[in-house]
Image: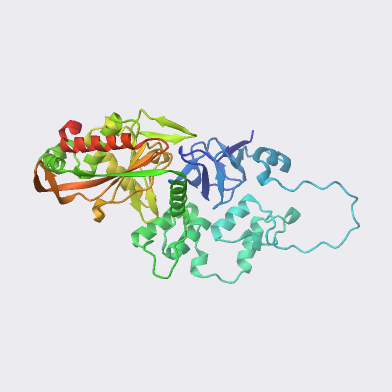
Amino acid sequence: MAITFGMPSLGHTMEKGKIIEWLKQEGDAVAKGEPLVVIETDKVITEVESPADGVVLKIAVAAEEERPIGSPLVLLGSADEQLSEADIQQLLGDDTAAAPAAPPVPAPAPTPAAPPRAAAAGERVKISPIARKLCDELGIDPATVTGTGPGGRITREDVEKAVQAAPAPAAAERVKISPVARKLCEEMGVDPVSVTGTGPGGRITRDDVLRAAEAAKVPSAPAAAGSTVPLRGMRGRVAERMFQSWNTIPRVTEVMLVDMNATVSFRQAMLAQWEQQYGVRISLNDLITKAVAEALRRHPRLNATLVAQEVQLHENVNVGVAVNLDEGLIVPVIADADRKDLGQIARESRELAEKARAVPMRLSPDEVSNGTFTITNLGTTGIDLFTPIINPPQIAILGVGMVQRRPVVVGDALAIRPSVYLCLVFDHRAVDGVPAANFLQELQRLFEKPQEFVL
């Protein structure tokens, strides 16, 4: 029995997804749990597995198209299953419906058969699954092929004839490459001939292009002067979410200069012991993440999300730590950060950052979902103070500046000590100024006595 597979929900902030590449084509067999399609969400690009064994009967959404959660994407069934256009329309909905059949009319007088022709622009191409797969492998547009099958349907033989009749293609055009990979080559300035394909029959996939670009150190940013940077892919998702946040959230910013002398000194004294104990070098950012998790547990009003006009205070403290990429900003999440020791936080932070920067990105949807609070640290770039944008539906974000030696008042004297600007931006619909200030004061107390939240 045919089943419809719709756009899955790959995160609580996801509203729609974009088809990047179909890993199976119409007519292909697929096993339950086998990768079926590559989908881009507002956070990650990930392979989605087939929900059942069967054959791909009908693909409803082409590559590069977006659909909301639940929208039908593909029809799966058995190899011998016969479905009419009406059946397909009922299962997939109106988006893929064929034009209704015209009422029967008397047969006209016989006329000479019209010669086969290629499909006109915008006309639906009739093509067998095998022929479509061959077109994809050879980089041929099915609309340019003349079909000789029943009703002008394009067969495998038609595609092979078109290849033989065409002028000898350039080397890059003879490469077996998926449409998505070819487009990525054009965007990144990668010659397909230089890419090793790992797909079926040596076909070049999207991942092959990304690996080749990384190996060749092909820069995607900064862009050359006078060029344009299209807002698409991850960069486009970041743009959409930041525009939404800026225009819908009444935000307030509170800034506090915090003396970090005790924390910096404590880290220096414990560094060797921690490295032996945890097997990882503890950074100042790891200590900040641990302190923020502890402060959120004590001040749950900031550990919340705003959904459907309700502020949901969460029991789990899931801290997102922003990672900058050339394509945009990604926020991997350390789940239950308040329950983890310093070593666990340090290891997870590095593992998540490595996955985020890997080519291709190896973060799973679970690793970027369900965050309850975000930290973004620009200290390593020399920035003292900045006001980050809230990552909805979270209600607050902490911007951390550079920890550096500054003149601070200690008692009645002036001293030079390491200090940092903590910049808390919060949604005033969900939390008021005093609870937010109490949260910053809690962080200040923790940094003055780091043994309290570390040991």
- Give the quadrant of the N terminus: top right
- Frontmost residue, 137 versus 382: 382
* Residue at 35%, 53% in the rendered image: 325
Q: From where the camera sits, is residue 283 visible? A: no
Residue 313: image location, x then y, percent? 39, 30
Relative to 200, is 251 above or below? above
Residue 116: image location, x then y, percent? 74, 62
Way the structure is coloured: rainbow
**Left or right for 313, reference 404:** right
Outermost residue on the top side: it is 315
Which picture quadrant has residue 167?
Answer: bottom right
Residue 36: image location, x then y, percent? 52, 43
- Give the quadrant of the C terminus: top left
**Left or right for 301, reference 289:** right
**Left or right for 52, reference 254:** right
Relative to 364, is 451 above or below? above
- Frontmost residue, 248 versus 450: 248
Q: From where the camera sits, is residue 201 visible? A: yes
Relative to 18, is 204 above or below? below
Which picture quadrant has residue 365?
Answer: top left
Which picture quadrant has residue 273?
Answer: top left
* Residue at 61%, 54% in the rendered image: 132
The image shows a total of numbered marks equal to 0
Outermost residue on the left side: it is 413
